C-alpha cells in the first residue's frame, strides 16, 4: 500500500530519508552523503524535505532515490511501501551488482539466493568501515577482514547447526 503525500505536499519517502540519515552512526551530514553519490547538499536537503527552495513538492528521480536509500540503509521494501517501487527495483539491482563485484564477498555470497535485506546489511557494514575517517587504512583493512571472516565462520556454523537439526527432525519421523 503506497503512502500518500504529506500535508505539506512532500512525497512520503522524504521523511523516511531524513529520519534514516539522522539515525546513522557515526552521524553524517546531507552534504557529506550527497558528495558520495555526486549530488549537491542542497539537492539532498530538498529531497529530504520533499520541497524545493520555492516550497514546491519535489522528489528524487529513481536512480537518485536508489543511491540515497543505499547510503542511509533504506530497504527496497521500504521504498515500495512509501510509493516508490521504481526506486525499489533499482536499489535491488544496485545491491546485487555491488555484491557481485565486491572481491571480499563475491566468492561466497549468492546474490540470487541471499535475501536483499541481508545483502544490504553486509554492504552497509563494509561502507561504515571504509568511510570512517577516524580509522587508519590499516585499521580499516583489519576490521573489514575480521568482518568478512566472521561472516564466513558464522554462516558455516549455522549451516552445521541446521544440518544437525535436519538429521534430528528427520530421525523423528
Image (spheres, rainbow, N blue to C red):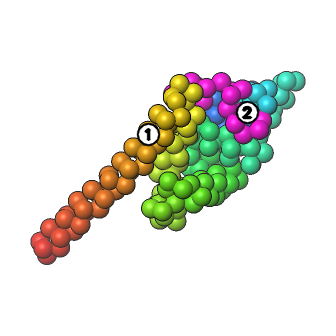
N-term mark: 1 or 2 = 2
Above or below, 155 relative to 125: below
As drawn, which residue projects farthest toward the left?
172
For this view, does 58 lie left or right of residue 159?
right
Viewer can see residue 85: no
Q: Residue 23 lies in magenta, yes or no?
A: yes
The residue at the point 31 percent across, 59 percent down is: 156
> Within the image, what quadrant is residue 44 found in?
top right
Between residue 2 and residue 43, name the one nearer to us.
43
**What is the number of the mark on residue 162?**
none
How many numbered marks does the figure carry?
A: 2
Q: Please provide percent x and percent y for residue 150.
A: 36, 48
Between residue 20 and residue 157, name the one nearer to us.
157
Q: Nearer the viewer, mark 1 or mark 2?
A: 1
Residue at numbered disc 2: 35
Above or below, 107 relative to 29: below
Real-space Cα separation, disc 1 to disc 2, in angstroms? 26 Å
Image quadrant occupied by the C terminus: bottom left
Between residue 130 and residue 82, name the one nearer to us.
130
For this view, does 105 lie left or right of residue 68?
left
Q: Please provide percent x and percent y for residue 18.
A: 64, 29
The residue at the point 83 percent across, 28 percent down is: 52
Residue at numbered disc 1: 142
Instruction: Please state the extent of the stretch shown in magenta in the rendering.
Output: 21-39
The residue at the point 68 percent across, 28 percent down is: 32
Kind of element beneath mark 1: helix
Badge 2: few (under 14), some or many (20 or more) residues near its Cα, within 10 Å? few
Q: Please provide percent x and percent y for residue 121.
A: 49, 45
Amino acid at each position: 500500500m503506497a503512502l500518500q503525500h504529506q500535508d505539506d505536499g512532500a512525497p512520503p519517502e522524504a521523511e523516511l530519508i531524513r529520519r534514516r540519515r539522522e539515525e546513522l552512526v557515526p552521524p553524517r551530514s546531507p552534504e557529506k552523503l550527497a558528495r558520495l553519490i555526486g549530488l549537491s547538499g542542497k539537492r539532498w536537503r530538498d529531497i529530504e524535505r520533499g520541497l524545493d527552495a520555492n516550497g514546491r513538492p519535489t522528489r528524487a528521480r529513481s536512480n537518485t532515490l536508489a543511491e540515497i536509500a543505499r547510503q542511509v540503509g533504506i530497504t527496497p521494501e521500504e521504498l515500495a511501501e512509501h510509493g516508490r517501487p521504481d526506486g525499489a527495483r533499482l536499489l535491488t539491482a544496485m545491491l546485487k551488482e555491488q555484491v557481485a563485484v565486491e572481491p571480499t564477498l563475491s566468492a561466497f555470497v549468492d546474490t540470487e539466493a541471499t535475501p536483499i535485506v541481508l545483502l544490504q546489511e553486509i554492504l552497509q557494514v563494509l561502507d561504515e568501515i571504509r568511510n570512517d575517517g577516524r580509522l587508519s587504512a590499516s585499521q580499516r583493512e583489519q576490521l573489514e577482514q575480521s568482518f568478512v571472516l566472521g561472516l564466513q565462520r558464522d554462516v558455516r556454523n549455522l549451516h552445521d547447526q541446521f544440518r544437525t537439526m535436519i538429521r534430528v527432525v528427520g530421525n523423528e519421523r
